[in-house]
Image: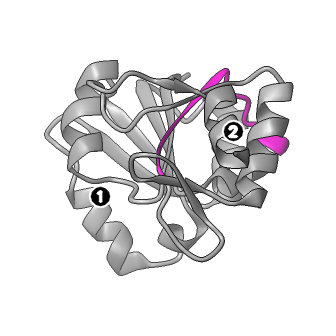
Amino acid sequence: MGNIVLTRVDSRLIHGQVMTKWVNQVRANKIVVVSDELAADEFMRSIYLMSAPTGVEVVCLSEAQAVESYAADVFGSGNVLLLLPSLKALKNIYDQGVKVDSVQVGGLGGGPERKVVFQNITLDDADAVILDELAAAGVKIVFQTIPEDAPQDVDSILKKYRG
């Protein structure tokens, strides 16, 4: 069985900070990317698979595949960094049985109706509802882009969002 050492929501998925800082910080030897879009795009998936540093396995799964893999054996073996592109994707798999104790929000891009709440992290109303629901279910949620940043708790972020 795998051991989830970090669940991270970051719309950029695998990028320099994840690969060089968070993998080392949490001693992950496997990254499980959960993205319906990426799982359906063979070309982009191959790029992500090639981007892993030596000794780190990368697996790209759809949300449905992630639910199955988690139920079977918590994503196989190793120390797993579970990486999702959005809070919606996290909530979808959480509601289907992928239970996580804590979540780190590290990057959610901008767009219409989105408000900056911490560095490059933006939220919209749907994200705020999901954060409320996950927190009410007992999931510890922090906002942190890189290890050197002090983590921001979800309550202070939502207060800032709701202004």
Queried whether the magenta region covers residue 103, the answer comes back as: yes
For marks 2 and 1, the one nearer the N-term is 1
Q: Which mark is residue 158?
A: 2
Q: Which residues are magenta?
A: 93-107
| Mark 1: few/some/many CA within 10 Å (<14, 14-19, 20+) | some
Q: Nearer the viewer, residue 102 or 52?
A: 102
**Helix, strand or loop at disc 1?**
helix
**Residue at point 82% right, 48% down?**
129
In this rendering, is residue 28 above or below 82? above
- Indicate the quadrant where residue 46 lies: bottom left
**Helix, strand or loop at disc 2?**
helix
Q: Is residue 130 visible?
A: yes
Q: Calculate the distance from the C-alpha at mark 2 to the C-alpha at mark 1.
A: 34 Å
Q: Position of residue 63 (x, y in %)?
A: 67, 57
Q: Amino acid at mark 2?
A: Leu
| Mark 2: few/some/many CA within 10 Å (<14, 14-19, 20+) | some
**Residue at point 53% right, 76% down?**
40
Residue receiving disc 1? 49
**Residue at point 72% right, 36% down?**
98
Q: Amino acid at mark 1?
A: Leu
Give the position of the C terminus as an image quadrant: top right
Queried whether the magenta region covers residue 101, the answer comes back as: yes
